Image (cartoon, helix red, strand yellow):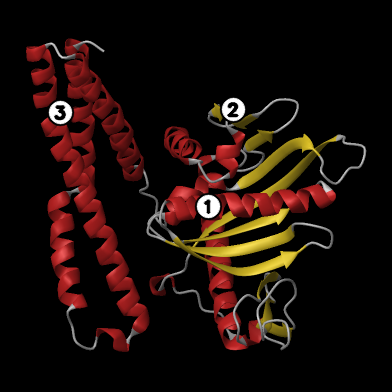
Amino acid sequence: MAAPDMTEALAALDQTMRSVETVLDLPAKRKEIAALEEEAAVPDLWNDQDNAQRVTSRLSFVQGEVRKTEALRQRLDDLPVLIELAEAEDDADSFAEAAKELDELTKSVGELEVRTLLAGEYDSREALMTIRAEAGGVDAADWAEMLLRMYTRYCERHNWSYDVLDTSYAEEAGIKSATFAIKAPYAYGTLSVEQGTHRLVRISPFDNQGRRQTSFAGVEVLPVVEQTDHIEIPEDELRVDVYRSSGPGGQGVNTTDSAVRITHIPTNIVVSCQNERSQIQNRASAMTVLQSKLLDRRRQEEQAKMDALKGDSTGSWGNQMRSYVLHPYQMVKDLRTETETGNTAAVLDGEIDEFVESAIRWRRTSA
């Protein structure tokens, strides 16, 4: 890229960055950091562990966001100097270094810009993700487990903490379903675009004739309930069953009736948790999932009312949203955004940022 072209591209990138900075409102973020630091310095902060976790987690997130934004701004301000030096010395290596830095900055600013698009009511929340095997028999169960690994690897790549709450194992291979909590700010806003049906086409490893098999798995993403949501659940509306955990587990997990299944009688919503060691912990985790499901149900009912008032008859964008083909060719394609790649191994190892970011942009333009 010639110096004039680089300068023009840098000017456009700087304008995008200014828009991002305006939306993020760094002065307000710095004030929030100061207030959170005061809360975190209170001697008895950890007497209320839930509040302490909220304060320290939010403080860490906001500090990281400000540092990242300031670092990008500094790099953007430094790049024109590098371009000028390369031009003055007519140095090919310096031009290459500047071009590489411009490419990296363009990607980083784009990622930060996507973050500013997460402005929905629950987008800043942590998330609960459930993966279920659908049509396709044992291949579908295996596919559900592959998706579970894909999303947990995605979390690990982003240094997001997660906790698997419940896993129901299939008889031959794979899983019937799994639910896990993703403990990171904006996890719900980011991953809610992954909700829907994921389709896999491959040569079945479970077919002794080596035939091609199509299987399906469903992904559900819910925001984690907070105290301000006011989801009251009377005890007489709950049926609580305890049972012995199944599947792989450590000492004590499979030998006591520690697993908990809760049925919300009015809605017939059923949730379960079996991955904690104690019945009390499993019940608490199951109640968290139930509250999130009831919150989502309320949100959907409110949205249905709004759609009825607007005369909105469009279907949900969530169904059949991505196709993963491993045979006769290699391709992953998002059916909403047309984003695609031939590097299926990387995608299944959690490298789905391109798909997530394009879907967030698509959702914003389709709203």
Q: Residues within 10 Å of mark 3 (few under 14, many from 20)?
A: some
- Determine whether the residue tagged by mark 1 lies in a helix, strand or loop: helix
Q: Mark 2 or mark 3: name the one nearer the start of the chain.
A: 3
| Residue 30 picture quarter | bottom left
Inter-mark Cα distance, 1 to 2: 19 Å
Q: Using a 10 Å C-alpha cutoff, classify the residue at mark 1 as few (fewer than 14 neighbours), some (14 to 19) or many (20 or more).
A: some
Say which amino acid is labelled 1.
Arg
Q: Measuring 17% from the left and 13% from the top, which residue is drawn there?
A: 3
First in sequence, mark 3 or 1: give its number.
3
Residue that label 3 marks:
79
The Cα–Cα distance between marks 2 and 3, rounded to whole angstroms, is 33 Å
In the image, taking residue 94 as reference, residue 321 lies left or right, namely: right
Q: Quadrant of residue 177?
A: bottom right
Quarter-of-image position of residue 62: bottom left
Callout 3 secondary element = helix
Is 214 located above or below residue 3 in the figure?
Answer: below
**Residues at discs 2 and 3 in contact (Cβ within 8 Å):** no
Please give left or right for residue 182 compared with residue 321 in the image: left
The residue lying at 60 percent from left, 76 percent from top is: 286
* Residue 196 image position (x, y, % from top left): 62, 46
Q: Can residue 140 be spotted in the picture?
A: yes
Q: Which mark is residue 342?
A: 2
Q: Is residue 190 left or right of residue 238?
A: left
- Mark earlier in primary sequence (1, 2): 1
Q: Are marks 1 and 2 in contact (CB under 8 Å)?
A: no
Residue holding disc 1: 153
Secondary structure beneath dot 2 equals loop
Q: CA distance from mark 3 to mark 1?
A: 33 Å
